[in-house]
Image (cartoon, helix red, strand yellow):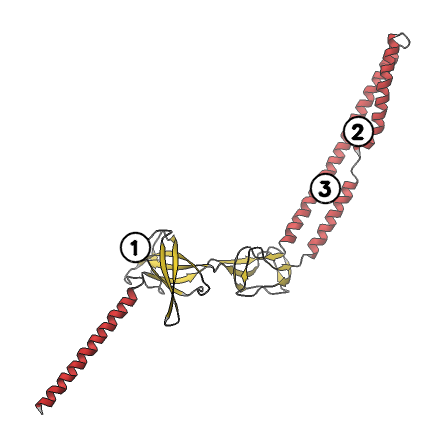
Amino acid sequence: MKNKIFNRKVSNWSLIIIFSFQFSVFNSGCSRNRNVYDASGCFEAEETVISAEATGVIRQFDLEEGQILVAGQLIGYIDSTQLYLKKKQLQSQIRSLLGKKPNIALQLSALQSQLKNAETEKVRLENLVKGNAATQKQLDDINAHIEALSRQIAAQKSTLDISSNGMDSDAESLQIQVEQLEDQIAKCRLASPQNGTALAKIARLNELTTTGKPLYKIADLQNITLRAYVTSAQLTHLKIGQKVKVFADFGEKETREYEGVISWISEKSEFTPKTVQTQDERANLVYAVKITVKNDGYLKIGMYGQAMF
């Protein structure tokens, strides 16, 4: 009977020892898993809200959320009919104004012909005066006539130049207005200003939009950023341009590894965000670090990630 009781006690102690050993192995494994990463955070991208640069009804808007856009790609346009008609009106005014410009050479041709004849007569009279066939008074009269014609031509040319230059200035002012309208018409074209992925479609087809009203949101997801937090002790071993390993979890078992580059380190500390765990969870002040990662299409904004330095 005593032997049975002793055997049962030995067996119980064996189970306790085995269980304690397994629990300690489990705890040590968990502890190693918690400390295998140096920092953690969330993936983010620089999001840009694209707004309308013109006022009018959206007549075409070929955009879907998740669509990959290329810089300069046309995705729609805002109604610009009134702008186009105003441009045509100004161009017509320019043509009409320039058509009234005086032909300076033609209007001065009659006086210049008279001047040429007077100068020829002057030469003839000079020869006659030398031969005593004409008087000095006749020569003086022709000189006075030439001077009067020259002044008349100069005065008329000045008047015509002022009139012509004034019309040119008016036409130039109208042309500037035409260029302004062309710029407004160009801004009615909805083209992507950069490469990226459409994150959100804010405006809709046939809606009335105004200048500055948001149309859609875009971000470059080909290069995504992991915003992680490190302690001051870790900060001494980091520098911009340093390559690090980045990990992202997909489900319970699958983990993908990426190569990242530190692109930014905060110059001031902040309190540890509640959603982020550092290597030393007792640290109150941490520094934000941005790690740029080449996205293979699996990484998403807001996804949780870790880094090893």
| Gap in angstroms between the C-alphas marked 1 and 2 | 85 Å
Q: Quadrant of residue 174?
A: top right
Q: Earlier in the sequence, mark 3 or mark 2?
A: 2
User: Whole-Å distance between the Cαs marked 3 and 2?
Assistant: 23 Å
Dot 1 alpha-carbon crowd within 10 angstroms: few under 14, some 14 to 19, many 20 or more: few
Asked if the residue under mark 2 is in contact with the one under mark 3, i.e. CB atoms within 8 Å, the reply is no
Q: Secondary structure at mark 3?
A: helix
Residue 114 horizontal side relative to residue 180, left or right: right
What residue appears at the point 67 percent right and 56 percent down from the top-left corner? 80
Query: What residue is shown with label 3?
Result: 171
Say left or right for 77 vs 217.
right
The reply to whether residue 304 is in sight is yes
User: Is the residue 209 above or below the residue 239 in the image?
Assistant: below
- Local crowd at mark 2 within 10 Å, few (<14), some, or many (≥20)? some
Camera-nearest residue between 56 and 34: 34
Q: Tell me the residue that label 2 is attached to.
A: 156
Across and down, in percent, residue 258 comes to 39, 61
Q: Is residue 146 left or right of residue 218?
A: right
